[in-house]
Amino acid sequence: MRPEQMPARTAAAALRARHTLPASTVDVAALTALLQQAGRRLIIITPDSQRHVAVGWTDETRPVIDQELIVGPVASWSLAVAFAAALGMCWPDSSATPYPGQAVTLDEVVNAAEKAGMSHAWAKGSLINLLASAGLVDIDGGILRLGPTVAAFTPAQVSGFRRIHDRLPSAAGPGNDDGHDDQRDVEEVDQ
């Protein structure tokens, strides 16, 4: 561990609060080992030119929602629709990785959620206040991208979203390619 890097336990606590940390500030090997003990995995994301780390579930340990027993939080209808609109708008190509997806305006996502049956106020409030704080979306100056929590989805979760991709709210017409290669934005940490 370099002197400017924080201890693994401190980094794990900071990740709970902030969703991502610059990779240069953590001891990746020590943090990976700590997270493996907890049934989690460390992923490295590159939303811009700087590498960041985030925490993800493994397919074996992700929270399960069962009809008889609920383990983990359950999204309300409004959160589910608002997130589906963000996912549909920002992830036009289901063969690509969803994170970080395509940048769109917040208004475009709100309009897609409205078409799916949400009120404008509920859609915008869900995106800005709840989904952004959960790291599912990033909103900066009216521009929305999928957040680092999406990068932490397990392969099984991404596969599930791929199965319903054609039912997600999306923009009519061709998508706008921002020239960003989504395939290079998420990498697994060697375990």
Image (spheres, rainbow, N blue to C red):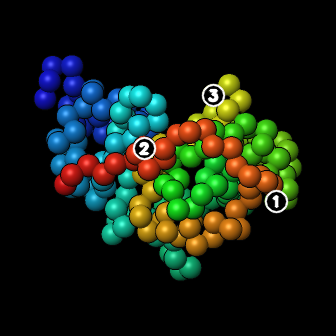
Per the image, the residue denoted by label 2 is 185
Crowding near pointer 3: few (<14 within 10 Å), some, many (20+)?
few
In-image side of 26 versus 179 (left or right):
left
* Whether residue 95 is situated above or below residue 135 in the rendered picture: below
147 horizontally vs 82: left or right: left
Q: Which residue is mark 1?
A: 116
Rendered location of residue 47, percent (x, y): 46, 36
x and y percent of residue 49 in the render? 41, 28
Kind of residue at badge 1: Ala
Residue drawn at x 52%, y 40% is: 180
Left or right of 96 in this view: 14: left
On the image, the x and y values in percent for residue 68 come to 53, 80
Q: Is residue 110 visible?
A: yes
Q: Secondary structure at mark 2?
A: loop
Q: Of the residues under marks 1 and 2, which one precedes in the sequence?
A: 1
The residue tagged 3 is: 140
How far apart in space, not on screen, are marks 2 and 3 (Cα)? 19 Å
Q: Nearer the viewer, mark 2 or mark 3?
A: 2
Structural distance between the alpha carbons of marks 1 and 3 = 24 Å
For badge 3, the amino acid type reads: Asp
Q: Residue furthest top?
A: 4
Q: How far is the residue under mark 1 from the one under mark 2?
A: 29 Å
Q: Residues within 10 Å of mark 2 (few under 14, many from 20)?
A: many
Tell me whether the residue at label 1 lies in contact with that at label 3, contact meaning CB atoms closer than 8 angstroms. Answer: no
Label 2 amino acid? Asp
Side of 165 relative to 115 (left or right): left
Q: Residue at x 37, y 35 (%)?
A: 52
Choose between 17 and 90: the one closer to the eye.
90
Location of residue 116 with respect to 122 vertically, above or below: below
Secondary element at image label 3: strand
Give the residue displayed 61% in from the left and 53% down from the top: 91
